[in-house]
Image (cartoon, rainbow, N blue to C red):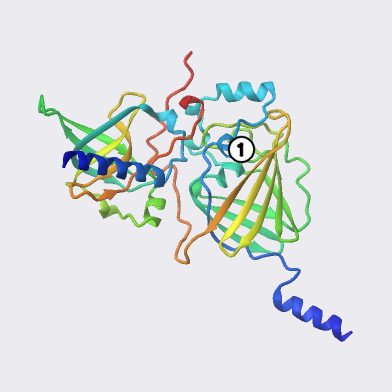
Amino acid sequence: MRRHLLAATGLCFTVLIAAAPAIAHHSFAAEYDRTKPIKFSGKVTKVEWMNPHIYFYVDVKDEATGKITNWACEGAAPNGLYRNGWRKESLKAGDTVSVDGWRAKDGSNLMNAGSVILPDGRKVFAGSADDGGPAAR
Amino acid sequence: MVTASLALFFALQTGVGSPPDLNGFWSNQYTPNLAQALGHEPPYTPYGLERWKNVDTKDDPTGKCLPVGPSRAFTAPFPFQAVQSPKMMAFLFEYQTIYRMVYLDGRPHPADIMDYPEFMGHSIGHWEDDTLVIDTIGIHERSWLDTAGHEHSGQLHLIERIQKIDDNHLKYTVTYDDPVFFTEPWSITRTFTRGKSTDRVMTYSCEENNKDVEHLQSNKKSQ
């Protein structure tokens, strides 16, 4: 079952990356590190449906220490998300989500969200695209 | 006489001789890296190659909310609205909420445009049968050609050809001619796709919540 869940998650992840609205506002590699993937689950504390990217914030609990860290997750531009059928309410404070993405290069608690999945398996907005620029080589 | 009149009548009825109607909402084909679309890196001059090797992605002008430039406006993952009249074609881009005006009235480029470059350049155009040909110079050298960081000089000369393939597709071919950065002109072709009838270009405000700028990192090891 767990294997199936992982496989399904991987499939969702792949589909989202392939079809996701892309970053154009800046080079992905200027802000995020493809070699530092990160995955966590937690409770959404806030959603910012604004240009040039949406942000949502997730409280992530360290099971060993009990410490909670609030992560900022960057997504695509709201206009494109809207045209693809997403709405502000698609993800809201209080939702529990599983997020896959990449860490910011500056080491802050910021990540670019590649996939966002609700407990029932529904995928919600996110997106990024690599661009092959010098920093990615 | 009758034959000529009939020919004129049918030409007017069918639009023969008139340029195609490009009005509408169109989606770009996202092209973050022109070299990937070209299949290889552009034919750099030594100077152009040096600039590409040393471009710093933290300096991305649009990351700082500067205008997108004429090349990137047509390759970004955002739509645009084409507004056409006999003497002008306007492209209203969602990305950075900016526009390009293409003068079709026969005027030349301003004599001093190279001394007063603009981020979107100055564009004049004409129809060659069913194809709109756009000639753009005076493009501010701070703009980038794409998200990956391909740069250009103030000598950049863009030649764009837009051909209506069918009601829902435009063939877009852009030629980059910049003797400072490239040894010869080079071109890529993309496809624009018509949106749904309910689609609309929306306001994009780079400044509304731009949190990226404080996180952008230099890719230069020496810094």
The residue lying at 48 percent from left, 57 percent from top is B201
Q: Is residue A23 left or right of residue B11?
A: left
Q: Is residue B208 above or below residue B169?
A: above
The one of B115 and B120 positioned closer to us in this rendering: B120
Judging by the rendered image, the residue that carries numbered circle 1 is: B38
The one of A66 and A9 positioned closer to us in this rendering: A9
What is the three-letter code of the residue carrying label 1? Leu
Where residue B170 appears, x then y in whole percent?
60, 57
Q: Secondary structure at mark 1?
A: helix
The one of A51 and B28 positioned closer to us in this rendering: B28
Q: Quadrant of residue B202?
A: bottom left
The extreme right residue here reads: B1
Mark 1, other Cα within 10 Å: few <14 / some 14–19 / many ≥20: few
The residue lying at 35 percent from left, 57 percent from top is A85
Could you tell me how many numbered marks the image carries?
A: 1
Marked residue chain, label 1: B
